[in-house]
Amino acid sequence: MDGIFNINKPCGITSHDVVARVRRILKQKRVGHAGTLDPSARGVLPICVGQATRLAEYISESGKTYQAEITFGVVTDTYDSEGAILRTSDVRGLTLAQIEPILSSFLGPQMQLPPRYSAVKLQGQPAYKRVRAGEEVTLTPRPIEISQLQVLDWQSPRLTLLVACSKGTYIRSLAYDVGERLGCGAYLSALLRTRSGPFELNTSVTLEQLSAASEQDDIASYLLPSDSALPNYPAIHLDATTSARVLHGNKFRCDQIHPTTQPVRVYDARGNFLAIATWDAAQQMWQPGKVLVSTMG
């Protein structure tokens, strides 16, 4: 089985828990997720199966959209509702008019410091594990981009935002940083991911629905093709001889499109998705990267 499930992750379980559940439901070993969601977060979590696991990095590279609830006047050590309270402040006088100019300052490319309690690797180990072991950790800011911050609701002290952002953006850090900029503190009290790359919440499926479909032998109704992860990549279709070169990982020529820095999707003449290829400017040829051999048939 090869393909992608657009799973609606519930609160209270990890992304790895979702992978384990899907493995049991499908009775498949080769299962992985694209783009981690914290246990307290819910929403879109693409789950890749079989050959599609090799495409998880491309989904993770894509932009994401969230609905985030930020509560002002409280700071926690994890920047969310799971952590210990570090300090509180009186925000009864806080208004949306004070918040909105601060929000606009977070739009665009910027450097963001991840939370200490995060999965960012330090010498091969997630930062949160080192913190819980009592170690002092030092993280460095990372480049991110926030393209949209839209106020959906304001019921003091809670603000609900639509956030569109690049990969690697921590919405917990955004909540913390906004609170610090205002001087009153804040934490992320709820998070819903509404989009991850091309996968949208309104077309997602719950684990319960997937399990029921498995019992009715109807898994195929929820399984998306592997190339659904890459709708914005140009596509090229090759003849049988060139397709055979691709499946052996050999470079090839194709004049269907102009050379581009963007990867391309490679198909055979029958429409089978073969590989992702990149342009080798030195040799003026396309180089297959991820080759999906099992899609031939």
Image (cartoon, helix red, strand yellow):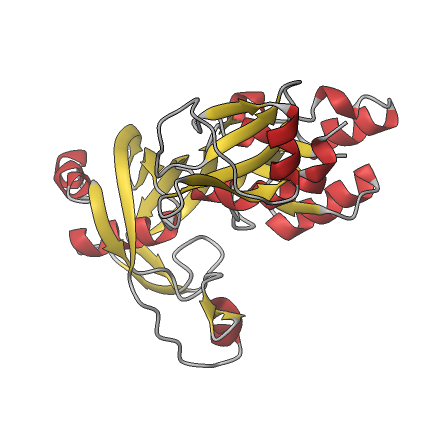
Residue 113 percent location from the top left of the image? 30, 60
Residue 280 percent location from the top left of the image? 41, 44
**Residue 91 shows in the view:** no
Up the image or down, 191 lies above or below 152; here it is: below
Q: Quadrant of the C terminus?
A: top right
Residue at left offset 62%, top offset 41%: 291
Residue 63 percent location from the top left of the image? 39, 37
Up the image or down, 143 lies above or below 126; here it is: above
Task: Check the image and name the residue furthest to the bottom.
Answer: 135
Q: Is residue 106 left or right of residue 60?
A: left
Q: Is residue 209 left or right of residue 72?
A: right
Up the image or down, 228 lies above or below 23; here it is: above
Residue at left offset 31%, top offset 49%: 175
Up the image or down, 149 lies above or below 110; here it is: above
Q: Nearer the viewer, residue 258 or 276?
A: 258
Residue at left offset 35%, top offset 39%: 261
Q: Nearer the viewer, residue 70 or 85?
A: 70
